[in-house]
Amino acid sequence: MGQPVHTVESPTGFQLALQDRIIIGNLPNVATAAGGGAGATVTKTFSGLRLPANYSVMVEASQACFASVSAKTSAGFTVTLTPTLSSVTLAAGTIDVTVVA
C-alpha cells in the first residue's frame, strides 16, 4: 500500500479545472476495433461521462499509431487512432485512457 499524499501543488501559470480538487480517472484496456483497410483510422467514442468543462486526456495504444482526442465536452470525448504509415492497417487492440482535471 502506498503512502497517502496530502499536498498537491499546481505549477505557476497552470490552473486546475476545479479549485478544491483534482480529478483523475483511468480506463485501462479499452477494446478498439481493427481498421477498415490500409491507412484507415479507428475511432472510439466515450460518452455518458460527468467531466468538468476543462480537462486533459492522455491515450496509450497497444500498437504503433498516432492517438488524438477531439469533440471534448463535459459528457465525453472521441479518441482517433491513425496508422503511422498509409500502407498500415490497424489491428484490433486496446487503449489506456487517463483523464486529468
Image (tube, rainbow, N blue to C red):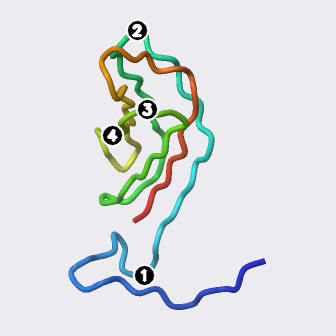
Q: CA distance from mark 4 to mark 3?
A: 12 Å
Lower sequence index among marks 4 and 3: 3
- Position of the N terminus by quadrant: bottom right
Mark 4, residues whose alpha carbon is within 10 Å: few (<14), some, or many (≥20)?
some
Task: Say what amino acid the circle numbered 3 marks.
Answer: Thr
Q: Position of residue 49 (x, y in %)?
A: 48, 46
Mark 4 — residue? 68
Q: CA distance from mark 1 to mark 3?
A: 29 Å
Q: Nearer the viewer, residue 40 or 8?
A: 40
Mark 3 or mark 2, whichever is nearer to me: 2
Q: Are marks 1 and 2 in contact (CB under 8 Å)?
A: no
Name the residue rendered at 34%, 14% in the picture: 87
Mark 2 — residue? 37
Q: CA distance from mark 1 to mark 2?
A: 47 Å
Mark 2 or mark 4, whichever is nearer to me: 2
Disc 2 secondary structure class: loop
Task: Say what amino acid the circle numbered 2 marks.
Answer: Gly
Mark 1 — residue? 20
Name the residue rendered at 35%, 83% in the picture: 10
Lower sequence index among marks 1 and 2: 1
Mark 3 — residue? 45
Q: Are marks 1 and 3 in contact (CB under 8 Å)?
A: no
Residue, far left: 13
Lower sequence index among marks 3 and 2: 2
